[in-house]
Image: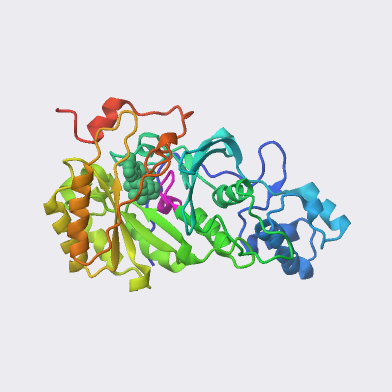
Amino acid sequence: MTAKAPITQDVLTLPRKDADGDKINLVGLPRAQMREVLIENGTPEKQAKMRVGQIWQWIYQWGKRDFAEMTNLSKAYRSDLEEKFEIRIPEVVSKQVSTDGTRKYLVRINGGHEVEVVYIPEDDRGTLCISSQVGCTLTCSFCHTGTQKLVRNLTPAEIVGQVMMARDDLDEWPVPGTPTDANRRLSNIVLMGMGEPLYNFENVRDAMKIAMDPEGISLSRRRITLSTSGVVPEIARTAEEIGCLLAISFHATTNETRDVLVPINKRWNVDTLLQALADYPKVSNSERITFEYVMLHGVNDSNEDAHRLVSLIKQYKIPAKINLIPFNEWPGSPYTRSSNNRIRAFADIVHDAGYASPIRKTRGDDIMAACGQLKSATERARKSRKQIEAEAGMTKE
Ligand code: SAH
Ligand code: SF4
């Protein structure tokens, strides 16, 4: 088993009970835990498994929040449940819709913290970009979220609750008795919002297990992509315990540059990371690892970088596709975006070497919903511009 990654300070785990009442939230509990709390609260042990199955379906298959609607349970049992439990997901504070149809939600979680969730509709799919932490402890110098200090890890309820919230807004909970898979508007999940998902491993895992559960939201593991900046000890566990697809925030081809852009590189460097990816279980050509590569003018976008990138991936024999992300600027960002011609030239080199090299279309940038622009406007613990520049190694200029 892999060593556990250090969990950073400032992480506050929430008690299961609601702050203003003492009801237990059933959302986010793995089946075994839901069974336990039902038994602890008076459900006869012999019935517990069946009750979990029934309640589970009402919550995750039909999207119900009210015990009164769970009509295959007796009235008396429903009112017992009502007294002790709740079905609670994050609250939508605001919603913005971009001219391209992208929706950005600001949601409030326990303690009044806020995170962002983005829904991106495309012709053949709808992708929900969800957050795993409030802020991020890592300080990638090109990322807006990285300028917000970590407040805390999200709970499983708050993570899967983002998916449930979006299904509410898209009005796509199936009606009991009808096929559950007809015309899904939310067909894919990417863990590419705020936070480093592998620094909140267990909660992300429990939430994604619920999203994949065939008796509930029922998304295939191949429709879930977890993006990490490179928390090496947790990478193998991602395959073993979640089984979703993996994306890596690679962004640089030398340790010197990656140390600045993705400072976790100082702990697990380019070679250590590539070795972990080469060992990622179950990789096949149809389940390639996505290398995310943000295009920063004059920093990591030369032809030489492109050649070095493909030779590294070849050297480690990693089934890969390279997703080129035009840098999205944010107020105070210390970099600028590479020109379209530069991005195209870079993409051509990667493509000619035999790797898919799609250029990510910027979506929702009119509402600051694009990659790396997420950050709750209300947060207070901001880093100063000077600090951002210092971390980006720009103070001397
Ligand atoms: N913490 C995880 C997931 C969230 S970031 C990670 O780093 O992988 C999702 C993706 O957006 C990452 O690849 C990240 O590097 C990229 N990103 C961050 N800031 C960006 C920006 N300003 N412009 C474009 N992409 C950015
Ligand atoms: Fe955190 Fe990912 Fe942003 Fe880095 S790129 S600061 S890991 S959210």
Image-based side of 279 in relation to 195, left or right: left
Of the 4 image quadrants, the one containing the C terminus is top left
Is 197 contained in the magenta span? yes
Image location (x, y in percent) of residue 108: 57, 37
Q: Residue at x 19, y 67 (%)?
A: 314
Residue 31 coordinates in the image, percent (x, y): 64, 63
**Residue 24 position within the rendered picture, expressed as x and y whole percent measured from the top left:** 69, 48
Relative to 296, residue 314 above or below: below
Q: Which region is colored magenta?
A: 191-200
Residue ID at (59%, 65%):
213
Q: Is residue 164 a member of the stretch shown in magenta? A: no
* Residue 296 coordinates in the image, percent (x, y): 23, 42
Q: Nearer the viewer, residue 359 or 288?
A: 359
Would residue 3 be visible to someone looking at this image?
Answer: no
Marks counted in the figure total 0
- Residue at 69% over, 62% down: 57
Q: Is residue 161 visible?
A: yes
Question: Where 386 falls versus 244 (above or below)?
Answer: above
Determine the image quadrant of residue 356.
Answer: bottom left
Report the quarter where the N terminus lies: bottom left
What residue lies at 61% left-to-right and 65% top-to-bottom? Answer: 181
- 260 lies above or below 320: above
Query: Taking 166 as reference, is 152 left or right?
Result: left
Coloring basis for residues? rainbow
- Specify the quadrant of the image occupied by residue 174: bottom right
Above or below 104: residue 123: below
